[in-house]
Amino acid sequence: MLVSMRHAKHPDIDDVRLTEVMAALSDPIRIGLVRLLADGVERGWGELRAPVAKSTLSHHLRVLRAAGITWTREEGTRCFVRLRRDDLEARYPQLLNAVLGAAGREDVGDGVGLATPTGSGTPTGSGVC
């Protein structure tokens, strides 16, 4: 079952599959996004910065959402993303902690960060969350 929020579709946590989660976490940019979101703060897409084109960043955010790792919320023309940490912990205990710990030790995803305070918070890429 998919839960729909305007344009964004999220898998129900019971439909999330380990192979999809692991595939989504196989990219350094996506691991960097997960590391950034691990603080529990919901972020506007325009706040996020990575060493890739905006359209590629949008793609990475969609992959994380489709795998059930993040939740995206649309508010007007702005998109916001947060980590589904509690859901993932319930489904796969300690998986996220293990990935985050290893990524921190190996500096995986260090190129991902927050924009300067002048970030607009507007959606990246096509404008569809």
Image (cartoon, helix red, strand yellow):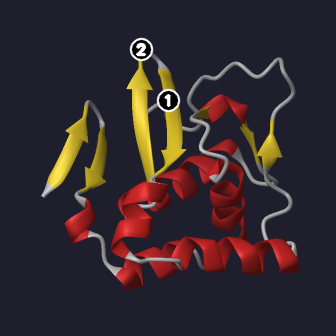
Q: Residues within 10 Å of mark 2 (few under 14, many from 20)?
A: few
At mark 1, the secondary structure is strand
Q: Position of residue 31 (x, y in %)?
A: 67, 67
Residue at the image point whose x is 57% and y is 57% from the top: 60
Residue at the image point whose x is 87% and y is 72% from the top: 107
Q: Quadrant of the C terminus?
A: top left
Q: Position of residue 21 (x, y in %)?
A: 44, 75
> Residue 35's image quarter?
bottom right
Q: Is residue 129 visible?
A: no
Residue labelled with disc 1: 79
Residue labelled with disc 2: 76
Residue at the image point whose x is 81% and y is 33% from the top: 115
Q: Quadrant of the N terminus?
A: bottom left
Q: Is residue 64 visible?
A: yes
Q: Is residue 56 left or right of residue 89?
A: right
Q: Amino acid at mark 2?
A: Gly
Residue at the image point whose x is 29% and y is 70% from the top: 16
Q: Residues within 10 Å of mark 1 (few under 14, many from 20)?
A: many
Q: Position of residue 109 (x, y in %)?
A: 78, 65
At mark 2, the secondary structure is loop
Note whether 70 is above or below 121 in the view shown: below
Q: Amino acid at mark 1?
A: Cys
Check residue 117 in the rendering and tell me which mark sits there, or answer none.
none
